[in-house]
Structures are given as structure tokens and as C-alpha cells.
Amino acid sequence: MNVKILAIESSCDETAASVVENGRRICSNVINSQIDIHKLYGGVVPEIASRRHIENINPVIRLALKEAGYTLEDMDAVAVTYGPGLVGALLVGVATAKALAFSAGKPLIAVNHIEGHISANFPENPDLEPPFAALVVSGGHTYLANVPEYGCYDIIGKTRDDAAGEAFDKVARALDLGYPGGPKIDALAKEGNPEAIDFPRASIADAPMDFSFSGLKSAVLNYMNSRKLKGEAINKADIAASFQAAVTDAICSRAMLMCEERNIKKLAMAGGVAANSALRKQIENECKKRGIAFYCPSFIMCTDNAAMIGAAAYHKYMKKDFAGYDLNAVPGLGLTGGKKN
Ligand code: KG4
Ligand code: ZN
């Protein structure tokens, strides 16, 4: 059987569509990014995002089908991100997917964006199959989870406050680096000393695999303010490198603790922050030392795209887990579907 899925993603500031075969072969992956507009405002403006999605979604879908060499009639299903994300942005994708599925008489598949990020690992790693552990480090979410089977996520750790990407974006704003902050800090950190400033690596006593990044963000702001008050110069590259080291240490130490405590031999990283060069290197090295197979999507598959939604949707298609035409956007959706939640 050759299952062809048209996938649509519009949860934040990328309008994306893709055709994926059997959850592993990407036939097309069209991404229309709105970053150039939102960076004028220092972050995503929800109303502008929704309007841009409305303008872009049909041409993006048309192009995704054309590049794949298919028509809508050739598809076995239409999949769409229904949460988490910005409600107005999600609704554009959801409404479009419902209209296409209804008009073409195809099943509709609702995909959790976070599950999509994890599934971004499948097309590029044909050998990756459950059971494995997932480390999700995105703009809005930070999770450690066990994946015993496709679509099943047992949460082992999560953030108590800010997500990893949120911390990058907030610190980048304080440093006047612009939006999105992650790639800017990643680049600037290469020119700085990661040991210049000893920023805190917070740990939570009763939950060693949970994360907390808001204290680190405050520590960076306090450091900058106190230097300014004393009239001392600020070395932005050192701050970026030291902050980034604190984040990567916090993420890496928890991921390794999870792998050791649970005897995990396969770790897949996912989400926008997985594009961070220091984090990729550190986790790869630590996994190598422990004989853990490490998986991480290519850069373009780390940040938002629709191919990852098509990869996740395939396993729902196989289970006939279809959505109704009453599907709605769920902006606050978490990573669910585990045996323990
Ligand atoms: O994972 P994502 O699509 O967001 C959510 O789904 O929530 O990715 C966006 C996040 C932003 O916070 C951005 O700053 C971060 O990923 N990011 C990075 C890098 N590239 C993107 N963070 C650190 N280093 C990078 N190279
Ligand atoms: Zn995302």
C-alpha cells in the first residue's frame, strides 16, 4: 500500500504544505515563512500571522501538490495541525483542511504540532522506530518523553515555566538581537566564551527531569542591569555563549539522566531549538559516550514545516484515527496520548 497524505501546517508564522508517502518519503515540502514581517515588531503578531496565512495557504498547497506531481484526488487523506499554536493561525489551516477533505471526499486527520516535531525524525532516519525516547525543545514546549509505540507519549519531564525556545527569544530581545532569537544567539555565541559568566543551572528537587528556564532568563537580565548601573561594558557574545551553555547543560544533563535511569538506547531530539549547533554537538557527544543512538532532524526539519505533520499523520491513518468536520483549533494542546496521561 502507498499512502499519500497532503499535510498542512499554520500554527505560528510559517504557512506550510507537504505531500508525504507512507510517513517517510517527502514528495514536497513547501514553507512560506513570515519571519521578515514579524521581525519588524520583535515577535510574532498574531493578527498579522492569521491574515498572511489566509493569503498564502492556497498557493502553498497548490505548489506542494504540483512539486509532488500529484493532484488532490490522488491523496488518501488531508492532515492538519490543530494545536498547540496561535488560535487565529491554526484556524486558517484547520478550516482549509476541512474544506479540502470534504470537497474531495478524503479522510481528515488532526495532528498535534508537538507530535509533528517528534515525527520530523522519521523521514530522514528510516531505522528509527519505537521504542525510543524523545527530547522536545521548541519555542513553546519542552518535554522528555518515552515513545513506546507510534503515537504514544509517556511524559517523563517538562518545563515548569518558560520553554527552551522562549528563553532564547527573551534573552535575544534583552540583547537587542532581534527575532527569532535562537539562531541569533547561536551565531553570536560562536564569538563568545561560554565560561565567562556562571549563569545558574536550576534544578527541581522533587522532579530532577523537569526543566525551569525563567530563573536563568532573570539572571541574564540582572547581570546586564547590574553591569549597566556600575557603568561597566557588556560583552554580548560572552553573555550569549554563557547563557547558551547554561541552557544546553540543563537540557543535556536531564536527557542523559533519563537515558541512564531508564536504560534508553535511542534518543530523538525535536523542535526549533534542536537546530542549535551547541546543543546538537553536546548531546551527540554525550550519547556517543554512553552508546546511545542519537537522532536529530536536519535544520529545515527542526523548525515548523508540514512534512513532519504528514509523517505523524501516517500512523493515525493506519489506525483509522480520523477527525470529524467539527474539528476545532486547540491552542493550548499539550503532548498527550501517553499511557500515563
Ligand atoms: O519549535 P518551534 O517551531 O516552535 C514551536 O513549535 O513552539 O521553533 C521556534 C523556536 C524559537 O523559539 C526559535 O528561537 C528557536 O526555535 N530556534 C533556535 C534555533 N533555531 C530556532 N533556538 C536556538 N538555536 C537555534 N539555532
Ligand atoms: Zn513548532
Image (tube, rainbow, N blue to C red):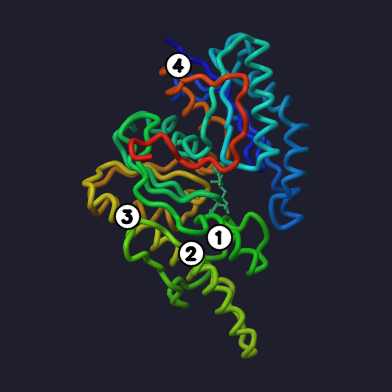
Mark toward the viewer: 3 or 1:
1
Q: Tell me what residue is drawn at x 37 percent, y 64 percent.
A: 204
For marks 3 and 1, the one nearer the N-term is 1
Quarter of the image with the C terminus in it: top left
Mark toward the viewer: 4 or 3:
4
Seen in the picture, residue 74 relative to 125 is either above or below; the reply is above
Name the spot of residue 132 as percent of width and height, x first. Answer: 31, 38
- Read off the residue under disc 4: 320
- Read off the residue under disc 1: 168
Say whether marks 1 and 2 touch (CB < 8 Å): yes
**Residue 38 falls left or right of residue 137:** right
| Label 2 SS | helix
Mark toward the viewer: 1 or 4:
4
Instruction: Pick whichever, 320 or 42, lies toward us.
Output: 320
For marks 1 and 4, the one nearer the N-term is 1
Report whether the residue tagged 2 is closer than 8 Å to ligand 1: yes
- Read off the residue under disc 3: 285
Label 2 to label 3: alpha-carbon separation? 17 Å
Q: Amino acid at mark 2?
A: Gln
| Label 3 SS | helix
Quarter of the image with the N terminus in it: top left
- Read off the residue under disc 2: 244
Q: Amino acid at mark 3?
A: Asn
Instruction: Pick whichever, 2 or 148, lies toward us.
Output: 148
Figure quadrant of residue 251: bottom left
Q: Amino acid at mark 1?
A: Phe
Report whether the residue tagged 4 is closer than 8 Å to ligand 2: no
Label 2 to label 4: alpha-carbon separation? 42 Å
Q: Amino acid at mark 4?
A: Lys
- Report how many numbered discs are placed on residues in the image: 4
